[in-house]
Amino acid sequence: MATPSSLLPLFLFLFLLLLTHSLLSLAQQNQEIQALQSFKLNIHDPLGALINWDSSSPSAPCDWRGVVCLNHKVSELRLPHLQLSGPLTNQIANLRMLRKLSLRSNFFNATIPISISKCTLLDTVFLQYNSFSGEIPMEISNLTELQTFNVAGNQMYGEIPDELPVNLRYFDISSNLFSGSLPKKISDLSQLVLFNLSYNRFSGEIPASFGFLQQLQYLVLDYNNIEGTLPSAISNCSSLVHLSAEGNAITGVIPVGIAALPRIQVINLSHNKLSGYLASSMFCNGSVYPPSLQIVQLGFNSFMEILPPQSSKCFSSLQVLDLQHNQIHGNFPLFLTNNSALTSLDLSGNLFSGTIPGSLGNLVKLEQLRMANNSFEGAIPVGIMKCISLNVLDLDGNRLIGEIPFFLSDLKSLKILSMGRNQFSGSIPSKFGNITSLENLNLEGNRLTGSLPDVLMFLSNLSTLNLSGNKFSGSIWSSIGNLQQLSVLNLSKNGFSGTIPSSIGTLYKLVALDLSGQKLSGELPSVLGGLPNLQVIALQENKFSGNVPEGFSSLMGLQYLNLSSNSFSGHIPSTFGFLTSLVVLSLANNHISGSIPPDLGNSSDLEILNLRSNSLSGQIPSDLVRLSHLSVLDLGRNNLTGEIPEGISNCSSLITLDLSGNNLNGEIPENLTVLPNLVNFNVSNNKLEGSIPMMLGSRFNDPSDYSGNQGLCGKPLNRKCERPGNGKNNRLIMLIAVAASGGLLLASCCCFYTYALLRWRRKLKEKAAGEKKKHSPARVSSRTSGSRGSNGGPKLVMFSNKITVAETIEATREFDEENVLSRTRHGLLFKACYSDGMLLSICRLPDGSLDENKFRKEAESLGRVKHRNLTVLRGYYAGPPDLRLLAYDYMPNGNLATLLQEASHQDGGHVLNWPMRHLVALGIARGLAFLHAASIIHGDVKPQNVLFDADFEAHLSDFGLDKLTVATPAEPSTSTSVVGTIGYVGPETALTGEATRQSDVYSFGIVLLELLTGKKPLMFTQDEDIVKWVKRQLQRGQISELLEPGLLELDPESSEWEEFLLGVKVGLLCTAPDPLDRPNMTDIVFMLEGCRVGPNSGQITIA
């Protein structure tokens, strides 16, 4: 037996070994602590998420937030969704035992450090949705254990490294700026399951080597610049579940074997250049059982034919089939009616003909059937009544005939029924009142007759009713007020007579009212002025009489008002100038007299002003020259006098200027020649004189545009102008004498004005001082219950400064009209210049706002909404008599609408260059994303609501104020019922009257397209909007047509050109017809952050 003394060396050896191991572990632990502390030191932590990273903790770092240890070594670092920002430091390499790194959904920037390759045990890297830039480190191939690599939604660029970790399974680099060709050595990644390169700039063809990836399940290549054909080798990817390459330039046909893959479920190849035929195996298969394919989306290509199956055995599990907007001709493919699992079928926008088969009734699970804009004919088959799950039936724009079938009333789940622009006759079936789920009924452009059936009044969920362009007669229902959800009512171009029923005044959700082209008569009901959401009023071509309703002035969201071709009389209400959202005002062909109100110059959004053929008199108000967005000004055939205002040249958007048939005198202003967009010009039949400006006569060389003016001379009239003679010289001498006398008179007036101004300012200061001594500001009662400042006067509740109401009233010059910055749907915005030099924007809400306590509560809540791209509420005031004020930072550089207007007529490189446009778009997106994260719907995203500070940083404005005003009786609490501006509002919002996050995204998309192309949404016709126009240019390859004049200098070979195209694609994504297809604002921010222009992106040039 060994003695204790003989075992002593062994014990000492073991002790030293244990001590050494402990010291090494402690050293490694200290190294990890130092690495994590270095990581923390270099990042910004606004939420204090890493506050417990304390090295003095006995369990540090294993008890730190986001740190996971294995055997006392850091094995995982998980810090997602914490708003962390800053670089990922090289010290991360000291976490040698790290297996999982998750920093997703933060604001990390800079490049991914090469040192990360030293963490050789890493198997998962989640860095998606940050702001990382630079390239993927080539050394990533050293991470032999790496299985998941996700850097989606960053700003990374460059090509994919030639060598990738051999055990890689999930590779997602979508929504970045990567370019180059697809990796040809992809076959080395035999374990690859997901490969997502969508929303980048990859080009070239898809390599055939993809066919070697037997484990590949998800191949996503959406929205790149991929060309060529689909390689048939993809048919060898036996595990493939999801194939998506939407939004590329892929040509040719689809290889037959792809649809025969045993596990394939989704094929999405929409928006490409595919052509030729479609094999029936795409929709059913005779060789694969049980079938797997569920979703096929091939819309917006050039397919021409569907080949029928060769065998009667055709199995299918297809649920969604989208073939919209191709060139497919022939009859309806009958074999599709055997796909009993089908829930959505879209064949719209093709060349189908023949009859609709009754065998459609076999599709008992069908929920959406869209076959609009084809050439189907005949009657609607009875068999369709078996599709009891249908909620959308769209047969619009075909050649269907006969009466509308009564059996459609058996489709109890129907929400959208659109059968407009066909040849239906007869009346609306009385049983339609049974479809109580119906929300949208469109029967426009048919041959329907009779009166409106009363049973439609039972459709309590109806939000859109369009019966225009038929032959209905009789009167409009007196009980139409029962349709409380109605937001769009279009009964135009029928034969209705009588008056508008007063019950229409209870339709508080009504957004658009079109009763034009009828035989309606009488005066307009005053209740129309009480519909708070009304944006469109079209009552032209009727027999209405009485005065033009002044009550329309209260409709602050009104954008379109057309009362032309009636018998209205009286004057144009001057209060129409309060309609700051008004875009179209047409009062032509009436009996309106009086003068044109100068206040119309305050309707800053006005684009069309048509007052033709009335009895208007007086001069053309010079205030109209402030309408910088005006494109049509038609004042012809009135009794206007005076001269043509020279300032009309400021209306640089003018396309049509018609002043014919008046009594205008003087000369044609020379500066009209500078109007760049003018297409139609007519000043005939006036009393104008002098020579026609040479350039104007060259542009508009039709003599009829100038005829009837005896004093006009020069081309294109056959009347030469006299040379200056003695008579002319005498007249010139007289003019000089008069001018000299006028100059003396003007100098005297200036002296008197200066003296009066000094006296007025002195009195104003004395008055303000007196009011402060009385502790009561002007226009505010001395019994004001608001809090008081140090001088005893009521004060604004400011979140930083101390300002009294008296100072604010003085700063706005007692809310003087000259201090008005803009008129919003929530009130007037004034410029406030305080005595200490401070500038604020003060929003004065209309009378009748919330009571003081509720107002303060809502204002305090709104004041907590702070973001660098939002107009932040700095203070508020609530006190009698009904005075409600909101204080914001002053934005000295105007709004986006004005900036775009200026950019379209100047050298865009000096006014609004590409870096500026990108930063503006990104700023709007970030602000809107922040609102959505705070559960705030904007409801009216448009260029006029994007303001710029002194540094030209974009700030989204006019949000969150609905709760600060009194709701209508029918809508006591909703804050999302305000519908946006015509041209910017989403199609679903126009139907429902409800603003949502998705409708905000649509509006943002329109603003983005306008920002990039310079085209206003209202420049287009009813058949083509800005979205369709952009798509058409892209399909034709006419990309240069998309460029706003200020961007014409972009080089097609430059990165900025690619960035511009990516921005256009983002705009198209935002404006997808289906709200569910639109990205959320967070995703949009990440996509736009990928559109930056390199190291000089922050250099903005402003003229």
Image (cartoon, rainbow, N blue to C red):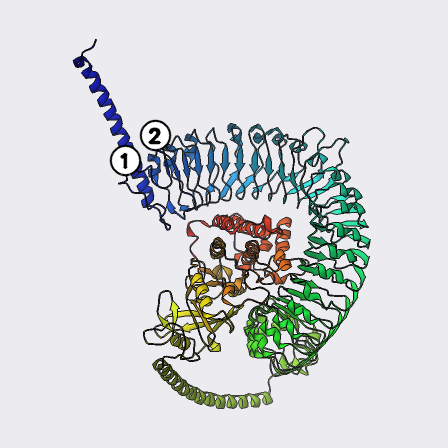
Amino acid found under the numbered disc labelled 1: Asn
Percent from the top left, x then y, of residue 590?
70, 77
Q: Counting other residues with Cα less than 10 Å from the Cα at mark 1, is it few (<14), some (14-19), or many (20 or more)? A: some
The image quadrant of residue 834 is bottom left
Q: Is residue 602 above or below residue 1022?
A: below
User: Quick one: quadrant of the C terminus?
Assistant: bottom left
Q: Nearer the viewer, residue 1100 or 136?
A: 136
Q: Which mark is first along the chain, 1 or 2? A: 1
Looking at the picture, tell me which residue is in the foreground, 24 or 620. Answer: 24
Q: Which mark is residue 208?
A: none
Mark 1 secondary-structure assignment: helix
Judge whether 397 appears above or below 345 on screen.
below
Q: Quadrant of the N terminus?
A: top left
Name of the residue lying farthest toward the top:
1
Q: Is residue 710 visible?
A: yes
Q: Is 430 placed left or right of 1008 in the picture?
A: right
Q: CA distance from mark 2 to mark 1?
A: 15 Å
Label 2 neighbour load within 10 Å: few <14, some 14-19, many 20+: few
- Residue 85 appears at what percent x and percent y? 39, 48
Q: Is residue 466 visible?
A: no
Q: Would you identify the image quadrant in which residue 322 lies?
A: top right
Label 2 residue SS: loop
Q: Which amino acid type corresponds to the residue marked 2 in the rendered image?
A: Asn
Where's residue 674, x and y in %?
A: 57, 70
- The x and y percentages for residue 327 are 72, 45
- Residue 30's tag is 1
Give the answer, above or below, for where 797 lies relative to 727.
Answer: above
Q: Which residue is denoted by mark 2 in the rendering?
A: 71
Query: On screen, 657 above or below 384?
Result: below
Q: Does 225 sit left or right of 148 as displayed? A: right
Disc number lying in front (2 or 1): 2
State left or right for residue 141 relative to residue 503.
left
